[in-house]
Amino acid sequence: MKILLVDDSRAIAMVTTARLESYGHEVRHAINGQTAIDLFQSDHFDLILMDIEMPGMNGFETTTRIRAQEGHEPWAWTPIIFVTATDSDTNLVTAIEAGGDDFISKSSPESVLQAKMKAMTRIAALRARLAQANGKLQDQANRDGLTGLLNRRAMDLRVDSLWEEAVRLGKPFSLLMIDVDNFKKYNDHYGHQAGDECLCAVAACIERVAVQANEDQMAPGVFAARYGGEEFSLVIPDAAAGVHVGIAMAVVEAIAALAIEHTSNEAWGVVTVSVGAACVTPANGLVKQVFRLADELLYQAKDAGRNRHES
Ligand code: GH3
Ligand code: MG
Ligand code: MG
Ligand code: MG
Ligand code: MG
């Protein structure tokens, strides 16, 4: 365990440190509350042993401040055990109120401290597992189950905040709506299973275009999402005007170059997409406008014969 030992007495700290180290723990000592807060900010600890009486900031106040810092991260929690010479019920109550988890007298036998530390680590480990599971759930909630791209919900959330930023800074905001051509016929001809595989290949290809545009610094922050069914989106939050046209061309070409056989896709014979590429410099408007514009452009691309983009 990595332990932060907070005590204004160097002598006590030395003895305690030696004991804890003999059990295999790693110990950092803070001589006062401010040092404890600084160390806590710059490092991770599994446990804090907190003195109460210290000149300046006492243990209660130090604890309150550490808890306030943790408040920014919903799953963060470092167990704090108060270790004190004055073993009173009032102190116990104040310690817990301040955000401490347990309380032990300096005269308690070594085994009691060990047992309390064990209990705290057990809770901390459980909490870490929950945090991990929560992270996985969050990721699942944001991804489309078939293609692994961001889903509509996650896209909408990101778009809302990116749009607000574009409005605030007067920056252009681009959106590409990408629709697989004659995909109903693909399903009818090759079956739904093949249709699913085709959508995965198309999604991966769109994702590659996004990654490339990011890497080239052409469109930093660009991301792909599955808008729904056989429709995908590329959101381009911060690119020079005109960049969306280049990316739309790249998508159309890259999908055709996959050369996935689709005999009933008009003259092409392979899977193709049509793209509506909208770029708006928002003065004050609503994000709906950019979706409506991209949709209109997409229908124009379909009308003009598919396997192309309109911007
Ligand atoms: P257009 O070129 O005008 O876009 O024609 P289209 O046939 O692609 O358009 P339409 O909207 O008529 O059909 C879309 C098809 O996409 C119908 C639907 O069954 C299929 N589709 C949507 N989601 C999925 C999916 O997850 N898997 C499979 N296999 N098919 C899907
Ligand atoms: Mg003290
Ligand atoms: Mg469609
Ligand atoms: Mg349709
Ligand atoms: Mg379609």
Image (spheres, helix red, strand yellow):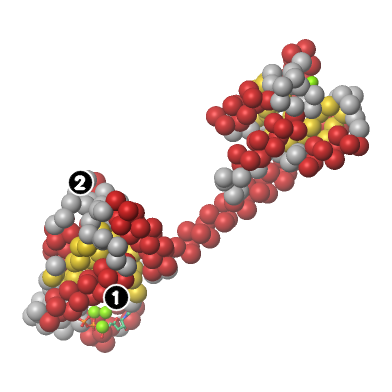
Quadrant of image for the C terminus = bottom left
* 23 sits left or right of 226 in the view: right
- To which residue does mark 2 refer? 216
Q: Position of residue 190 (x, y in %)?
A: 26, 82
Q: Position of residue 92 (x, y in %)?
A: 85, 37
Near mark 2 (Cα within 10 A), the count class, few <14, some 14-19 or many ≥20, is few
Label 1 beta carbon within 8 A of ligand 1:
yes
Real-space Cα separation, disc 2 to disc 1, in angstroms: 27 Å
Residue at 19%, 49% in the rendered image: 218
Near mark 1 (Cα within 10 A), the count class, few <14, some 14-19 or many ≥20, is many
Q: Quadrant of residue 162?
A: bottom left
Quadrant of image for the N terminus = top right
Rendered view: 114 above or below 188:
above
| Secondary structure state at the residue bearing disc 1 | loop
Residue at 32%, 68% in the rendered image: 286
Residue at 57%, 31% in the rendered image: 41
Mark carried by residue 105: none
**In the orientation shown, which residue stands out farthest toward the top?**
11
* 94 sits left or right of 68 in the view: right
* 193 sits left or right of 185 in the view: right
Q: Position of residue 140 (x, y in %)?
A: 48, 62
Give the mark nearer the N terminus: 2 vs 1: 2
Label 2 beta carbon within 8 A of ligand 5:
no
Q: Are marks 2 and 1 in contact (CB under 8 Å)?
A: no
Q: Position of residue 166 (x, y in %)?
A: 30, 55
Pick whichever, 11 or 158, lies toward us: 158
Q: Is residue 19 visible?
A: no
Tag 2: amino acid: Asp
Residue at 90%, 30% in the rendered image: 87
Mark carried by residue 230: 1
Q: Quadrant of ligand 3?
A: bottom left
